[in-house]
Amino acid sequence: AQKITQTQPGMFVQEKEAVTLDCTYDTSDPSYGLFWYKQPSSGEMIFLIYQGSYDQQNATEGRYSLNFQKARKSANLVISASQLGDSAMYFCAMSPSSNYQLIWGAGTKLIIKP
Amino acid sequence: EAGVTQFPSHSVIEKGQTVTLRCDPISGHDNLYWYRRVMGKEIKFLLHFVKESKQDESGMPNNRFLAERTGGTYSTLKVQPAELEDSGVYFCASSQLRASNEKLFFGSGTQLSVL
């Protein structure tokens, strides 16, 4: 079965600290993509970062990096130097090559404290 | 450039009524997707259009849901008749290409409440 697991329903982090949001996945597809999206209170899903299953290096996008450990089937999101505007829901999602449907985790609510 | 637009942002209807949700994708995006998140559950895929054709509708829960994409532009998702379990947030997304590495651009969703 294809599944995404986010084990942290909520997190509080002090402003300017780094934060790691956990994501593990399960798939039998040899090729797949892993995404992180941010959902602020406005409701819109905002793309943050993408990692392909065959990518040799971990993806980075500004303050966001994806700690991809293929053997452990984990794709944790790391946010460096957190800001108040980072407070939001964060979703991990997987796109298996077999059908291109996004499979989503339950999300992690991140709150940055000033 | 305008993003993905969804209308209405909120809809409150009674059980048995009909509701139509609308999505305007980013101009030039052939691929349009509908997802929904019901209370307490993960976001789930509903269906995928390529231009005006339904490419994959395996996620549609039952025949009370009807999606259309006239002329390959905007899309509508009609629920008729609505049931209590249809309550949730309905997201629309679009993309230029269809590939496992293609990021989707999402709208802000329609919060549907069926009473």
Image (cartoon, helix red, strand yellow):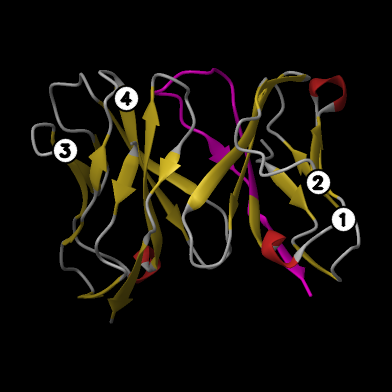
Residues indicated by labels 4 and 1 sit on the same polypeptide chain: no
| Disc ID at residue B81 | 1
**Residue identifier under label 3:** A73
Q: Distance from label 4 to label 3 (Cα)? A: 12 Å
Q: Distance from label 1 to label 2 (Cα)? A: 6 Å
Residues indicated by labels 3 and 2 sit on the same polypeptide chain: no
Whether residue B29 can be seen here: no
Which secondary structure lies at badge 1?
loop
Name the residue: 66% across, 35% down: B1
Tag 3: amino acid: Lys
**Residue identifier under label 2:** B64
Whether residue B80 can be seen here: yes
Name the residue: 52% across, 34% down: B104
Which residues make up the magenta segment? B91-115
Say which quadrant the C terminus of chain B sits in: bottom right
Q: Does the magenta portion include A111?
A: no
Q: Distance from label 4 to label 2 (Cα)? A: 32 Å
The image shows a total of numbered marks equal to 4
Tag 2: amino acid: Arg
Which secondary structure lies at badge 2?
loop
Name the residue: 64% across, 33% down: B47
